[in-house]
Amino acid sequence: MKLSRRDMFKIGGLAAVTAAGLAIPLGNTVSGATASLLPAGKMPKPFQTTFSRLEVLPPVKTEVDEMGPVAYYDITAKTGAVGIVPGMMTPVLGYDGLVPAKRIDVEQGTRIVMTMRNKLPQSHPTFGTPMPISTHLHGSASLPQYDGYASDVTTPGQKKYYQYPNFQPARTLWYHDHGVHYTAQNAYSGLASQYHLHDARERALLPQGEFDVAITLSDMMFAANGSQLYDDRAHSGLWGDVVLVNGRPWPVMKVKKRIYRFRFLNASLSRSYRPVTSPAAPMYMVGTDGGLAPKSQNISQWRHGSAERYEILIDFSKFKTGQRIELQNLSNPNNRDFDNTNKIMAFDVVDDAFDRNDPTALVVPGALDSSNDVMALTETSGLKVRNIRVQRNDTTNEWNLNGETWHDVVDSGFTKVLANPNLGDTEVWEIENKSGGWFHPVHIHLIDFKILSRNGKPPFAWELGPKDVVYVGEGEKVRLLMKFGPHRGKYMVHCHNLPHEDHDMMHQFSVGLNNGEVDVNDPIYADPASDDTDG
Ligand SMILES: [Cu+2]
């Protein structure tokens, strides 16, 4: 099923909200007290909830076949309800109806076959948007037909089998909806969770178990009845006034006097964060989107755009029992900040015992020895250099890459590409944002890249690891180095500010495909969704 250009204009309620947003100038950092329309006294307040860990989803079956170990998962996208606003229930979409959805943990070398069933209604219970879904495992070098290609949709009543190879180095991935033109509504309503790929190196070097903590950041705003409010301000973005950590507003977590590893994922549609601890706690970046960095980097804060993952060690060993350390948000230009969006969560130090013989408890590793080959790549003369401009068409209110959109890809019968490297090619991609009025977190599927420079200067300390999303800030030009493989086929490249992606800042590149060649891994036709009769 393909959605036409017209589909997005059919949504009465949503269009009305968006039209209201048009009156406000784009691109300004406009601060207000709140965005939610909740009655006084109902608005969630910081540090009133207890931190909640993401539960781990067990496989329904594991076995060893001729290719090795494989774990099977069976997930159903369906509606649910959560209690974020005191005394009110908020309708949501969830994997198995849960928000936050459970996370998946897997060892390197174990393949995953995941059945994704769409048991959503025909239209969104709050926004009225259509409900075809596509599931992307962000950070995985999956084959094109299992990569959550936006137009490879699973409609209500259908299911699709996804295959995830898990041969890559350990990393923090996440699975989330990528359905064409409605990814923003679907992810905002809950179709997202983390996925941790483990390996021996990461297990030896970094905190595990209780001290390896998933942190999914998101933001939300609410209508007077407690349902989600969606206002993407003429597709410029959605900035909620309630910051959620693993689905709870500004929670408080008890921490022991040792080092913790936090896997920060920014799952906000548009908001970027600049987390900082107060009082300052020692912090070290040890991993980025594509896994371990070559060495740890001592940082005092970091800039965190949508879909980026940063693994950060925070050392609580020098604090006193009872001390509270707030994780605050210094924000970045062109976000919309509200009364409490300068806070994320808090840590309360407790005196509980921990194993002092755990080598990760009190020592921050220096060299991490990234096994991700991309960090060993160097730029040599003669490499293909591609220039990509991220920009906005003010006439259509649509965002584009080099003037082209996903509509152009659809209209070309999915033949149009932004780049066509051969399998194994190494290239430099220069992504340029000439605007001073907005920022774009740009995600390239399939590969990991190394950031060579930003505006001619070295990347930030927290970016010195393998990446698959790059923050292209106002007036910034980033240079990225990447090697294309291990699969041939077509993959998306897009902005991860999801209202930008949906309208319509998404394109594709092909790897190793010759003109006119039949693509055996065609992202839409190779292994499409089918009717779900057994679920
Ligand atoms: Cu963007």
Image (spheres, rainbow, N blue to C red):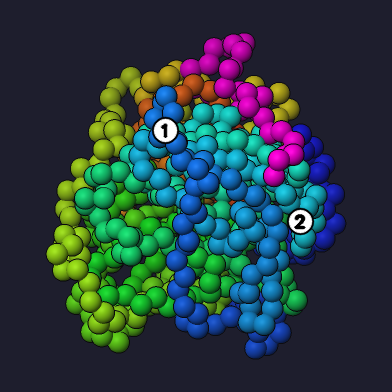
Residue 6 % position (x, y): 82, 42
CB-based contact (under 8 Å), mark 2 and mark 1: no
- 357 shown above or below 525: below
Q: Nearer the viewer, residue 51 or 462?
A: 51
Span colored in magenta: 510-535
**On the image, numbered disc 1 is attached to which residue?**
64
Residue 425 % position (x, y): 39, 21
Q: Residue at x 55, y 40 (%)?
A: 114
- 67 shown above or below 431: above
Residue 523 within the magenta-colored segment of the rendering: yes
Q: Residue at x 33, y 19 (%)?
A: 382
CA distance separating discs 2 and 1:
39 Å
The C terminus lies in quadrant? top right
Residue 529 within the magenta-colored segment of the rendering: yes
Residue 99 % position (x, y): 59, 62
Q: Is mark 2 within 8 Å of ligand 1?
A: no
Q: Residue at x 30, y 37 (%)?
A: 372
Badge nearest the viewer, 2 or 1: 1
Instruction: Give the label on residue 146, or none.
Output: none
Q: Residue at x 75, y 45 (%)?
A: 156
Instruction: Give the label on residue 124, or none.
Output: 2
- 387 shown above or below 116: above
Asked whether residue 15 appears in the rendered view, the answer is no
The disc, 2 or 1, on the residue closer to the chain's N-terminal end is 1
Judging from the image, what secondary structure is the residue with disc 2 in? loop
Q: Quadrant of residue 108?
A: top left
Q: Main secondary structure of the magenta part?
A: loop
Asked whether residue 88 appears in the rendered view, the answer is yes
Residue 250 % position (x, y): 49, 75
Position of 110 compared to 138: left or right? Answer: left
Q: Quadrant of residue 524?
A: top right
Amino acid at the residue labelled 1: Val
